[in-house]
Amino acid sequence: MANVIRRQTPAARLGRGLLYGVLILAALFYILPLVVMLMTSVKPLSEISAGSLLSFPQNPTFTPWTKAWGEACTGMRCDGVGGYFWNSFAIVIPAVLISTTIGALNGYALTKWRFKGSELVFALMLFGCFIPFQVVLLPMAQTLGWLGISSSRAGLILVHVVFGIAFTTLFFRNFYVGIPNELVSAAKLDGAGFFRIFWRILLPVSAPIIVVSVIWQFTQIWNDFLFGVAFSAHNTQPVTVALNNLVNTSTGVREYNVDMAAAMIAALPTLVVYVLAGKYFVRGLTAGSVKG
Amino acid sequence: MRDSLPMKNTSATPLGPAAKRSTPSGGLQAWLPRLVLAPSVAISLFFVYGFMLWTFVLSLTSSRMLPSYDFVGFGQYARLMANERWWVASTNLMIFGVLFVVICLAIGALLAILLDQKIRQEGALRTIYLYPMALSFIVTGVVWKWLLNPQLGIQAMVQGWGFESFRFDWIVDPDMAIYTLVIAAVWQASGFVMALFLAGLRGIDDSIIKAAQLDGASLPRIYLRVVMPCLRPVVFSAVMILAHIAIKSFDLVVALTGGGPGYATDLPATFMYAHAFTRAQIGLGSASAMLMLGGVLAILIPYLYSELRSRKHG
């Protein structure tokens, strides 16, 4: 530290100031939309049309939030986004649990019980991470119909599990590759079976990758719109679809404060996850890219 | 150790010639891993490969409201090629994709390099740069639609500051609306590219940089000539991921512009959805989905090829 300070010429100090200036400007670019969204959501409508985007709310009110939650019109019905918020949870929780469990078992089988063709199986499944989902929409709609679960929460859970296991398998496989094989081989010699080894040896060390997988799947499924809009009916819609309907419902006066409150409601769960577990969130995002 | 084990287990050691076949608990244990993987493989074969084939078959038919199996060869592809809206969508994807990828890379690299200069509060800044990635594209679209609203958003605000002639009404301008998609998408994804680059920078051996410094190279020169070449794999993966996001972009368009004004901001993803689900043109929609898949493969295959090559050499 001492020799750093010694070398602080005026030019260096200027450079340092510029550096912080650029970084803070960038921070404003990222944070201001959220600030505006939050401030708009607690302004009365009169203040919105009179004031400007960045003016601080003079008479903050919570009414837009209660309205967005329970009364705002989303298409035909006017009961807010609250019900759809719980719909999203009802879809996300089972889908995350099932896809993470399957991914963990797949990753374990692919790394600790390699067999002829197991790499091929992995490559085959990995491709599912890359397809544009438009290419499966129409057959999926028909298949859900045959299964009798079109426009239902069960149908959406199935869709999210089916297209999530490629990612969860990738996560767990890449994680378990790094776990030494010696322990597993020793347990095999002792006569321990497939599930026993998984339960006793792999699972206890899997906490970090479980967190990554759960967070990744949670944000992906919560934020999904394409499957939600294609495969749901009005009473099974996830919150993203309801939010879009609310914003695009063109009856009466545009209530921008209610729009923003609804957007905040839809954004909160993933934001909370990000704030609480940002480290793991980044790891999930980079798992497939940096490590390969 | 191994030799001291009871007889029953010795056959399981990899030393024995028949070791792999006869595990202690017999056949079931040997098949269990395959049994566990079987449902996933079946799912993948049916829901991914089967559905791709199915969509391809649909794209060869004259299906409109409902899937029919009246084959018309590549007629739907010909119709697609003659469809002006499809060309608008494809051109938009080129503009949007290239700008989105290039700007995200530039901002991401710049912020990562700046953050790597032993910055105070680096963690807080990183958190702020990256949080939009946690949001749904629908939320991003709703927020930016509000910010870009000419009567009440940024334009009105700057005009209110006294710059009466200031104009920023791209969202209602058919020629400029596509750039609003770029702004919103860059806002959402550039922090992620920053995180990728920062991870890459932290992985570079300090001694390389020190050596260049001893040679008297200036800091910008070191970054350009020494550091950036080391980050080529990061750039490559970032381009792959961003291009993939661009091709799949659907939600953002729906929430921000609804494809409008008119169909000025249509992308292939919204084109496909509109034709397959609301305009009763299943055949045409399937053809467009297949072309999207072709686009993804055109990016993916060189990527996988280079991955495999580097693995072989590394």
Image: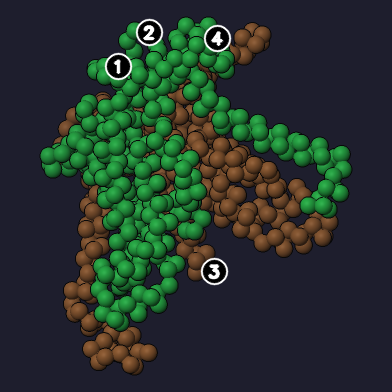
Chain colours: A green, B brown
In this picture, residue B181 sits left or right of residue A93 = right
Among the two numbered marks 2 and 4 on one chain, the one whose residue lies closer to the N terminus: 4
Q: Which residue is mark 2?
A: A253
Q: Which residue is mark 1?
A: A71
Amino acid type, label 1: Glu
Q: Is disc 3 in the same subunit as disc 2?
A: no
Q: CA distance from mark 1 to mark 4?
A: 26 Å
Q: CA distance from mark 2 to mark 4?
A: 18 Å
Q: Which residue is mark 3?
A: B314
Q: Is residue B102 visible?
A: no
Q: Which residue is mark 4?
A: A51
In this picture, residue B143 sits left or right of residue B112 = left
- Of circles 2 and 4, the one toward us is 4
Please name whichever residue, A152 or B249, is drawn nearer the observer in this view of the structure: A152
Among the two numbered marks 1 and 4 on one chain, the one whose residue lies closer to the N terminus: 4
Please name whichever residue, B15 or A138, is drawn nearer the observer in this view of the structure: B15
**In what element is the residue under mark 1?**
loop
**Tag 1 and tag 4, C-beta contact below 8 Å:** no
